[in-house]
Image (spheres, rainbow, N blue to C red):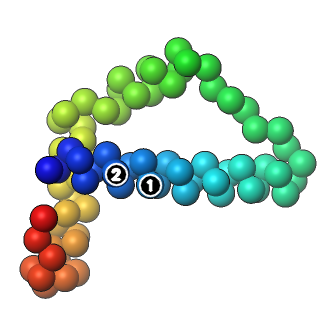
Amino acid sequence: MDEAVCQFGVMDRCCASQLLADAAARGRGIKPTIIDDEDAKFTHDSLCGEDMRYLMFQPAYEEILESSKGEILL
């Protein structure tokens, strides 16, 4: 469960960041830089292991529990 929620959150933040970056570049007339498959794979492999997903999710989950006073349990 931790991994699935973490992956969804990461994907959502990545999409939002990409849309903001694209809009900012377009507004300034800057052509976006597209990274190649090798760099994308390196980044994925570095940041997407099981341990990393757990470590990225756990603080967010604890914040949700605290802010909802325990009403939202995953």
* Residue at 22% across, 72% down: 64
Asked if the residues shown at circle 2 and circle 1 are in contact, with their CB atoms under 8 angstroms apart, the answer is yes
Badge count? 2
Q: Amino acid at mark 1?
A: Asp
The quarter holding residue 63 reads: bottom left
Percent position of residue 56, x then y:
26, 48
Residue 19 falls left or right of residue 28? left
* Residue at 24% across, 41% down: 53
- Which residue is farthest right? 29
Residue 43 falls left or right of residue 27? left
Q: In the drawing, what numbered circle is on residue 74?
A: none
Identify the secondary structure beneath mark 2: helix
The quarter holding residue 16 reads: bottom right
Percent position of residue 27, x then y:
84, 57
Q: Amino acid at mark 2?
A: Phe
Does any portion of residue 55 appear in the rendered image?
A: no
Residue 3 falls left or right of residue 37? left
Identify the secondary structure beneath mark 1: helix
Query: Is 44 placed above or below 4 here?
Result: above
Which residue was labeled with disc 2? 8
* Residue at 46% across, 55% down: 13
Q: CA distance from mark 2 to mark 1?
A: 6 Å
Which residue was labeled with disc 1? 12
Does any portion of residue 70 appear in the rendered image?
A: yes
> Quadrant location of the C terminus?
bottom left
Residue 68 falls left or right of residue 38? left
Query: Is 55 placed above or below 38 here?
Result: below
Q: How would you rate the neighbour count of disc 2 (Cα within 10 Å): few for under 14, some for 14-19, many for 20 or more?
A: few
